Image (spheres, helix red, strand yellow):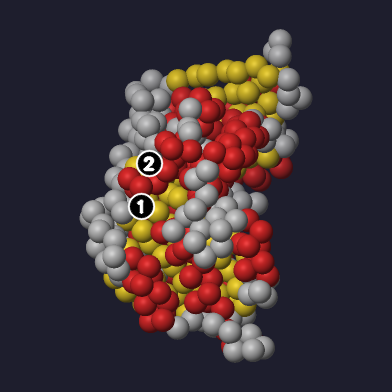
């Protein structure tokens, strides 16, 4: 990976992925995850995508992309710990496949830069339309009950911490936004945020850097950093929360404190431990709680790296709560005690390595991987982290598991249960 520093705020990264026939460009604006900003940040990229100096309205954006052999364009928000990230993504075929010699990557970058630094869509009608869409996205969170259960568990576990906020903002926050408020917010953050740009595929990186410099040469930036993330350390006792909704299947979400920081040398040990415990079809949760005992429809564990959290999610019959809950904890105790077969251990490491190796075949996941490493402050390359995984021992897994403590239990059950 090559990197170029455009200015104090903007970094450009180039990842050659020449075996693929596409080039993708991702723009990531880092903002602190705060109650005051979260709803405005969540609305902003969708409004900015609607029009800019280069393409003044949605129709011209569509036609511009069509002329680039049907290039794709997307925008959105997500969070990584205390970092609320506004992102734009464009993808096109590589320049070498353009039949008339077009510079497709540069044309995509030109559109992204115009949307980023020359937006023209902060009018009342556009903002009102995108506010409705934003409210629909917030409402839709509740429709996926598995995702909703983890969201609620996260809210309860991280109460008082910014990570409890949904990256989509709140209904009240979105409803309070006007076109003037959103434009004022844009003016405030566009020159005071760290901006990372990743280019994956085949491109003339110097030409793309020159384009970015051209769009920003007359702007004055205030130096910024990646927002910090503090670990969730837990409260000592286990918090238990039950919600009743019109559901036919219970959703159990359990939040654990891992005690392992994102930039710790021990984090790779935790990755392998999570893989052994609930990271896939090879794991203890899948093979014992789901397959052998038939206590749930699904059971898996996942890590929130920048907050030191591990979630276990399971779909269960209402009457099986106690059995599933106890068995989930029993499987964690088995990992802590080193009750792990050689097959489980090697399969868990292989699954992790295969997953990471697959990033080389997907430009979007490659960008998210590299961005995650940058946010964590580790910047491990793919081959480097694969080598680290291979070196993890059974004792390392036991050591990582020993730090894990149950903090929050959330159960979504039926009405009247």
- List the residue tagged with mark 1: 190
The percent coordinates of residue 403 (x first, y second) are 36, 39
The percent coordinates of residue 73 (x first, y second) are 59, 61
Q: Is residue 244 left or right of residue 260?
A: right
Pair 2/1: label in front? 2
Q: Is residue 190 visible?
A: yes
Q: Residue at x 44, y 67 (%)?
A: 198
Position of 311 relative to 216 (above/below): above
Q: Which mark is residue 342?
A: none
Q: Residue at x 53, y 28 (%)?
A: 175
Position of 47 relative to 374 (above/below): above
Question: In which quadrant of the rendered view does residue 401 lie?
Answer: top left
Q: Residue at x 49, y 53 (%)?
A: 120
Q: Quadrant of the N terminus?
A: bottom left
Q: Quadrant of the C terminus?
A: top right
Residue at mark 2 to residue at mark 1: CA–CA distance? 10 Å
The single residue placed furthest to the top in the displayed view is 416
Mark 1 neighbour class, 10 Å CA radius: few under 14, some 14 to 19, many 20 or more? some
Q: Nearer the viewer, residue 151 or 293?
A: 151
- List the residue tagged with mark 2: 184
Q: Is residue 71 left or right of residue 205?
A: right
């Amino acid at each position: 990976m090559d990197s170029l520093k455009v200015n104090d705020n903007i970094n450009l990264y180039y990842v050659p992925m020449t075996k693929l026939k596409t080039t993708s460009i991702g723009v990531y604006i880092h903002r602190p995850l705060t109650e005051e900003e979260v709803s405005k940040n969540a609305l902003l990229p969708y409004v900015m995508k609607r029009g800019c100096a280069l393409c003044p309205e949605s129709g011209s954006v569509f036609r511009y992309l069509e002329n680039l052999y049907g290039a794709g364009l997307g925008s959105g928000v997500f969070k990584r710990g205390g970092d609320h990230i506004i992102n734009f993504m464009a993808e096109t075929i590589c320049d070498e496949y353009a039949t008339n010699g077009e510079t497709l990557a540069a044309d995509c970058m030109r559109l992204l830069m115009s949307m980023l630094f020359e937006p023209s869509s902060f009018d009342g009608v556009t903002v009102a339309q995108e506010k409705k869409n934003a409210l629909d996205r917030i409402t839709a969170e509740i429709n996926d009950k598995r995702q909703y259960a983890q969201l609620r568990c996260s809210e309860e576990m991280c109460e008082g911490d910014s990570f409890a906020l949904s990256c989509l903002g709140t209904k009240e926050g979105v409803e309070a936004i006007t076109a003037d408020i959103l434009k004022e917010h844009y003016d405030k953050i566009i020159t005071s945020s760290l901006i990372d740009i990743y280019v994956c595929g085949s491109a003339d990186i110097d030409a793309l850097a020159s384009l970015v410099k051209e769009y920003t040469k007359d702007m004055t930036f205030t130096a910024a950093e990646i927002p910090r993330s503090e670990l969730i350390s837990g409260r000592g006792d286990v918090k238990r929360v039950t919600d009743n909704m019109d559901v036919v299947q219970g959703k159990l979400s359990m939040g654990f404190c891992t005690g392992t920081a994102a930039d710790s040398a021990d984090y790779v040990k935790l990755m392998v431990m999570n893989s052994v415990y609930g990271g896939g079809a090879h794991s203890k949760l899948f093979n014992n709680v789901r397959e052998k005992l038939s206590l749930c429809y699904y059971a898996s564990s996942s890590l929130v790296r920048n907050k030191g959290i591990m979630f276990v999610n399971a779909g269960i019959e209402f009457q099986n709560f106690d059995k599933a809950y106890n068995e989930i904890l029993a499987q964690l105790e088995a990992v802590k005690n080193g009750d792990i077969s050689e097959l489980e251990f090697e399969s868990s490491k292989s699954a992790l390595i295969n997953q990471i190796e697959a990033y080389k075949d997907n430009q979007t996941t490659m960008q998210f991987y590299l961005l995650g490493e940058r946010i964590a402050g580790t910047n491990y390359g793919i081959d480097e982290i694969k080598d680290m995984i291979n070196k993890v021992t059974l004792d390392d897994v036991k050591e990582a598991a020993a730090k894990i403590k149950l903090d929050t239990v959330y159960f979504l059950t039926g009405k009247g249960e």
